[in-house]
Image (cartoon, rainbow, N blue to C red):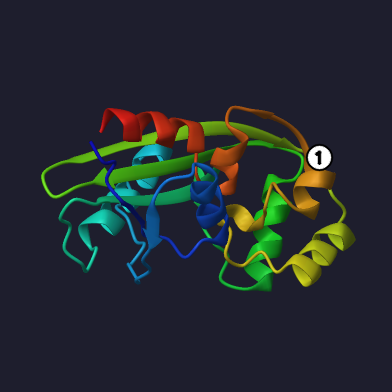
Amino acid sequence: MNKPRIILASKSPRRQELIKGLELDYDIHTYEVDESFPEDLKAQEIAVYLAKKKALHFPGELNNEILLTADTIVWVNDHVLNKPEDAEDAFRMLRTICGTTHEVYTGVCLRSKNKTHSFYERTEVTCKNLTDEDILHYINHYHPFDKAGSYGIQDWFGYTAVEKINGCFYNVMGLPVSRVNEELKKF
């Protein structure tokens, strides 16, 4: 039996890189979705809600394909950090997470013509305290405006600020690939 083709609905270059590593037959499809969510949701519920919302707003028709959508959020001090709006917002986010342990949640939704399945992965990340100068250097040289929490664990911030992680490294990059692989096998 042939494996179904995957449609990764994501603009994230990191998700695209990670799905490529699974050696799946896939296409990339991007479209805009409003990323607002109800205020009363818990962290993991926000990530799953947004992943489902992206799946439900897919503009195409699914035949034999499996649509894969995802959303990653950073949760610190009972607040969600999505992508920053500008450099000032990025600075505020990075100042907030430096010197703390925060949680990264990625919600994933798999959708076919006949069914939908969603799940989330959680990773704890502990960051060292960085100076304001280090944070500004990071923002000015790495432009983290497309990243939840304003940082990439796979770049300079991860190399210099991340002290330890508990959970899936790739989840922090935006897609818990091992879990996705297992869930696709069951789907």
Residue at left 34%, top 61%? 36
Quadrant for residue 147, please give it: bottom right
Residue at left 59%, top 42%? 172
Residue 119 location, x and y as percent?
34, 35
* Quadrant, the C terminus: top left
Residue 70 location, x and y as percent?
40, 50
Q: Nearer the viewer, residue 26 or 139?
A: 26
Residue at the far left: name it: 114
Quadrant for residue 14, please give it: bottom right
Quadrant for residue 135, please give it: bottom right
Q: Is residue 75 left or right of residue 90?
A: left
The answer to whether 77 is drawn above or below residue 133 in the figure is above
Residue with the mark numbered 1: 128
Q: Nearer the viewer, residue 28 or 145?
A: 28
Task: Categorize mark 1 by other alpha carbons within 10 Å: few (<14), some (14-19), many (20+).
Answer: some
Name the element at disc 1: loop
Residue 107 location, x and y as percent?
39, 43
Residue 133 location, x and y as percent?
89, 62
* Quadrant, the N terminus: top left
Three-letter code for the amino acid on which mark 1 is drawn: Lys
Q: Is residue 67 left or right of residue 137?
A: left
The answer to whether 25 is drawn above or below residue 103 in the figure is below
Residue at left 49%, top 32%? 178
Residue at the far front: name it: 1
Residue 47 seen in render: yes
Residue 174 seen in render: no
Q: Is residue 96 left or right of residue 1?
A: right
The answer to whether 176 is drawn above or below residue 80 in the figure is above
Q: Nearer the viewer, residue 8 or 161?
A: 8
